[in-house]
Image (cartoon, helix red, strand yellow):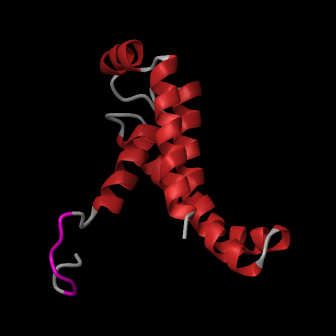
């Protein structure tokens, strides 16, 4: 959608793709209803976080730090929600494909992989907070 306005680049649309992946994981792979519910939850968390977190952060830190850390923390909350859903309900909020999900859970959801995913989320959030 940005091509008529900007020049074409390699990373165009990656933010939308990553957010869509998060919504699919939270909602449950193969579940349209779960994807709809997860999209509403992710949208509410992101919007409410961007609206209220900067003001809340400004009470604890300086004005400029609160203004930059608030939106970054709201983006981080989406990935933290995904990690919490993966830990407590690995098949997603609404499980779509039971056989495929149970196979993925048995083979992929190990403590090491959860730790690596949490570390990647933390690194991404630190990169977005850094000036």
Compared to residue 14, the image places residue 35 above or below, namely above
Residue at left 75%, top 80%? 63
Write the start and end of the magenta stretch as one range: 5-10
Residue 56 on image: x %, y %: 78, 69
Can see residue 6? yes
Total of numbered circles in the picture?
0
Q: Depth check: 119 or 86 in front?
A: 119
Residue 38 on image: x %, y %: 48, 47
Residue at left 59%, top 68%? 71
Compared to residue 46, the image places residue 68 above or below, namely below
Q: Depth check: 106 or 37 in front?
A: 106
Q: Report if residue 122 lies within the magenta region.
A: no
Residue 25 on image: x %, y %: 41, 38
**Is 1 placed left or right of 107 in the picture?**
left
As drawn, which residue projects farthest toward the front? Answer: 131
Look at the magenta stretch and give its main secondary structure.
Answer: loop
Can see residue 44? no
Q: Which quadrant, please, contains the N terminus?
A: bottom left
Residue 58 on image: x %, y %: 78, 74
Q: Tell me where residue 33 sits by quadrant.
A: top left
Compared to residue 112, the image places residue 31 above or below, namely below
Q: Tell me where residue 57 sits by quadrant.
A: bottom right
**Is 56 placed left or right of 107 in the picture?**
right
Q: Which quadrant, please, contains the C terminus?
A: bottom right
Residue at left 29%, top 59%? 14
As drawn, which residue projects farthest toward the bottom? Answer: 5
As drawn, which residue projects farthest toward the right? Answer: 59
């Amino acid at each position: 959608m940005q091509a008529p306005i900007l020049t074409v680049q390699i990373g165009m649309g990656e933010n939308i793709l990553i957010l869509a992946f998060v919504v699919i994981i939270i909602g449950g792979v193969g579940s349209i209803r779960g994807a709809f519910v997860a999209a509403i939850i992710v949208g509410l968390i992101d919007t409410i976080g961007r609206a209220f977190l900067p003001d809340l952060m400004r009470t604890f830190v300086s004005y400029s730090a609160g203004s930059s850390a608030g939106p970054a923390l709201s983006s981080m909350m989406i990935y933290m929600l995904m990690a919490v859903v993966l830990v407590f309900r690995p098949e997603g909020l609404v499980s779509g494909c039971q056989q495929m999900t149970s196979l993925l859970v048995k083979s992929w959801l190990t403590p090491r992989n959860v730790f690596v995913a949490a570390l990647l989320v933390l690194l991404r959030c630190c990169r977005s907070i850094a000036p």
